Amino acid sequence: MIRVLMVTNIITPYRQPLFNAWAESGKQAGIELRTAFMARSEPNRRWPADRYPLNHPHTFHGGLDIPIPGRSIRLHANPGIWSDILCHHWDFVIVGGYDHITSAVAGLLPKGRGGRLLWCESNIFGRRPRGGASDRLKRLLLSRYDGYVVPGERAREYVCTLRPAARRQPFLVLPSAVDETKFKTARSWSADRKAEARRRWGIPTNARVLLSVCRLDTNKGVHRALAAIVGRIDRPLTVVIAGEGPFQNEIRSYVRPAGKVQVRLVGYQEQDAVCELQGLSDGFVLASLWDAGPMALVEAATAGLPLLCSDRAGHCPDLVIEGSNGWTFDTTNPDSILAAVTAFAEAGEDQLAAMGARSAKLTDEKFATRRVVEAINDELIRLHQKRKTTR
């Protein structure tokens, strides 16, 4: 049995189905997964741990919970996790990131005979300019790992840019996976069901609807997208925005009774409501300056929506094929945003339906949970066998 310890900060609605499927698939493949969490939740996270039960051994470790001034997250320091790593035999320890004290120290602990992998979802566009103590520390931490687990090309690019020697090390791909049982439902919606959902949300049944689901902050770029299209696009369009955050009031200023672009701000929505919003929409937009592994993009593609996506977002190169299932744009360039949204607004119904079908096919081939966990298990087994032969 190959024993794997997965270290991460908190349980979330997207990690739970992934970890459960991973554990179940692992049993059949001879892999025993255990997860170690740094905390049950974090500030501004609406995900109580009890709502997301796990089907495999796991521990919520106590420790220091250190607030970061001006940030919604906290730094975790969990001696219990360090003890778990040092005092038990693991064939692989997978450490989620290095932005907590717990994960940073975990990368520096003695390795023993097992392999140590860094689970890195960072995006090259989120990096500050190279140089300085911060980058030196990151390069040191990256050098402590035997390989890397990444969700896609953007994260691999980040690791290799920061540490070019990493190109010679194993990269295991673990794409973001969502609960398909929920997000696939929109694919089969009838025209009548779509019209009825629009009436419930107060959206004209004949509107061209573009959906955005995200936190309303400077990074997610909703305000930039609206500034680029409101008053500049000459096709009727309804933009539905599900989310909340510090830019809420600025975004609300675009909610106007007249004009070609109608903006509906519906606030934070739970998963079932998001699925309904996907079902009534014609497309999905993500305008992030950077985004590690945007789950909302995977969810929208799984629902079978055409995608309009910033070329800086994680999963953009993995999920969006220009002109096939969507459009990409430079979120720092208003004209680029306008061109993508105009193309969406002018597209025919048949064209959008075909694009949505391609989005669904892409997620079935690359992001389906079963495929994802089977592939990561195969890679762990291969890496384990290789390590045994080279000892």
Image: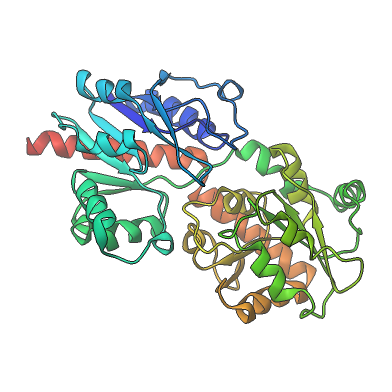
Whether residue 200 can be seen here: yes
Quarter of the image with the N terminus is: top left
Q: Residue lying furthest left in this view? A: 391
According to the image, what is the colour scheme of the structure? rainbow
Q: Nearer the viewer, residue 107 or 210?
A: 107
Q: Residue at x 14, y 29 (%)?
A: 112
Q: Nearer the viewer, residue 319 or 336?
A: 336
Whether residue 1 can be seen here: no
Residue 118 percent location from the top left of the image: 30, 43
Residue 109 percent location from the top left of the image: 19, 32
In the image, taking residue 73 as reference, residue 159 lies left or right, namely left
Residue 24 percent location from the top left of the image: 45, 25
Q: Residue lying furthest front in this view? A: 69
Q: Residue at x 80, y 52 (%)?
A: 280
In the image, taking residue 265 as reference, residue 299 lies left or right, namely left
Residue 165 percent location from the top left of the image: 18, 58
